[in-house]
């Protein structure tokens, strides 16, 4: 662990089908789509490790076994390339496997992000935890987004969502927040709406796939009724916490790529490739 962190567990909801990438996601988890030589979920795990977390709790589903194999040793492969120039290509993933514990549980029915997070309760218990949606790939030259959020958690000790300003026409793709700015770029949330139409959106401040949640969220999700799309939404559960002033929204430093869309995925691939060439 790089720094002492009040949060040691990061949850990865990874049961979704990835239909926007069909047919490639027919037999391959969308979290395993590569950006250059690393799968999306590895970027997320590295971001969580940089933020001081060493337990990765992954909510999987049918057809997701490749994720478990990725975060495990491959003796045949390691034996095969031992002593060759290729050995170093496994150094990063080997480091992750050595430093972290991975645990898995399956979401049997797809009932929304809130439901996926509740499914992870068995891996988390009664402690604050982070959530990464691996298809939001975040990069920053200094501290990663989750590291920034952990710093904020130390101060506010409540749930935190990462936000960015989006084109107002795009609000129906995101959870959208409104609130009072209490420090530059930091808001105490008063309203949260899941995927409002531009006419109904309170602002253009959209939640991206990084959360820190306090464990009381589990009981709240248990009583949260299905919302947008008939799914149990984490945005609706967080709105309950927000009613007592316990949700902060944070405009993070860095860049986020929506790798759940072809455009964002291609953009991430090109930009990370160009960046790699310059280093
Ligand atoms: C989910 C959340 C949404 C959030 C988004 C970030 O939506 O429900 O509030 O803004 O992730 O990526 P999804 O993209 O899974 O439809």
Image (cartoon, rainbow, N blue to C red):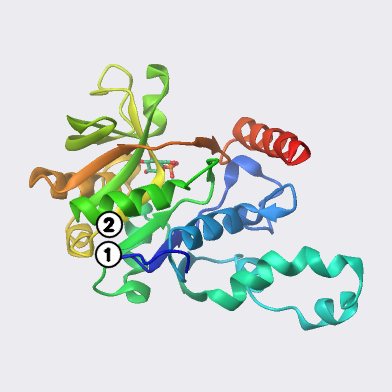
Q: Nearer the viewer, residue 243 or 86?
A: 86
> Residue 120's image quarter?
bottom left
Q: Is residue 168 left or right of residue 180?
A: right
Q: Residue at x 19, y 56 (%)?
A: 157
Q: Is residue 213 left or right of residue 59?
A: left
Q: Nearer the viewer, residue 110 or 134?
A: 134
Q: Is residue 32 left or right of residue 2?
A: right
Q: How many marks?
A: 2
Nearest to N terminus: mark 2 or mark 1: 1
> Where does label 2 land, which residue?
213
Q: Residue at x 58, y 36 (%)?
A: 261
Q: Residues within 10 Å of mark 2 (few under 14, many from 20)?
A: many
Question: Can you say which quadrant of the picture contains the C terminus?
Answer: top right
The CA distance from mark 2 to mark 1 is 6 Å
Asked if residue 198 is positioned above or below residue 218 in the image, the reply reads: above
Asked if residue 31 is positioned above or below residue 99 in the image, the reply reads: above
User: Contact, CB < 8 Å: mark 2 with mark 1?
Assistant: yes
Q: Residues within 10 Å of mark 1 (few under 14, many from 20)?
A: many
Q: Which label is found at residue 37? A: none
Q: Position of residue 12 (x, y in %)?
A: 46, 60
Cβ(mark 1) to ligand 1 < 8 Å?
no
Q: Quadrant of ligand 1?
A: top left
Q: Residue at x 62, y 57 (%)?
A: 29
Q: Which label is found at residue 128? A: 1
Q: Position of residue 1 (x, y in %)?
A: 47, 69
Q: Nearer the viewer, residue 19 or 159?
A: 159
Could you tell me which secondary element the residue under label 2 belongs to?
strand
Could you tell me which secondary element the residue under label 1 belongs to?
loop
Asked if residue 121 is positioned above or below residue 214 in the image, the reply reads: below
Q: Residue at x 35, y 65 (%)?
A: 5
């Amino acid at each position: 662990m790089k720094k002492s962190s009040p949060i040691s567990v990061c949850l990865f909801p990874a049961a979704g089908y990835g239909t926007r990438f069909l047919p490639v996601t027919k037999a391959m988890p969308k979290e395993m789509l590569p950006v250059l030589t690393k799968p999306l979920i590895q970027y997320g795990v590295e971001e969580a490790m940089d933020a001081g977390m060493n337990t990765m709790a992954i909510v999987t589903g049918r057809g997701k076994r490749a994720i478990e194999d990725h975060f495990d040793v491959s003796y045949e492969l390691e034996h095969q390339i031992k002593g060759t120039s290729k050995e170093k290509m496994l150094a990063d993933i080997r480091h992750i496997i050595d430093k972290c514990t991975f645990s898995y549980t399956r979401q049997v029915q797809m009932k929304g992000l809130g439901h996926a997070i509740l499914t992870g309760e068995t891996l988390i218990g009664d402690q604050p935890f982070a959530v990464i949606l691996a298809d939001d790939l975040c990069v920053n030259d200094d501290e990663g987004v989750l590291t920034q959020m952990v710093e904020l958690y130390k101060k506010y000790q409540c749930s935190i969502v990462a936000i960015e300003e989006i084109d107002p026409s795009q609000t129906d793709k995101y959870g959208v927040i409104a609130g009072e700015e209490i420090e530059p770029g930091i808001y105490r949330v008063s309203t949260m709406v899941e995927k409002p139409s531009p006419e109904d959106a309170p602002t253009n401040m959209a939640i991206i796939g990084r959360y820190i949640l306090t464990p009381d969220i589990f009981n709240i999700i248990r009583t949260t009724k299905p919302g947008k799309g008939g799914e149990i939404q984490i945005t609706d559960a967080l709105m309950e916490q927000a009613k007592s002033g316990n949700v902060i929204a944070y405009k993070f430093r860095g860049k986020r790529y929506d790798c759940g869309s072809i455009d964002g995925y291609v953009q991430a691939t090109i930009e990370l490739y160009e960046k790699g060439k310059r280093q």
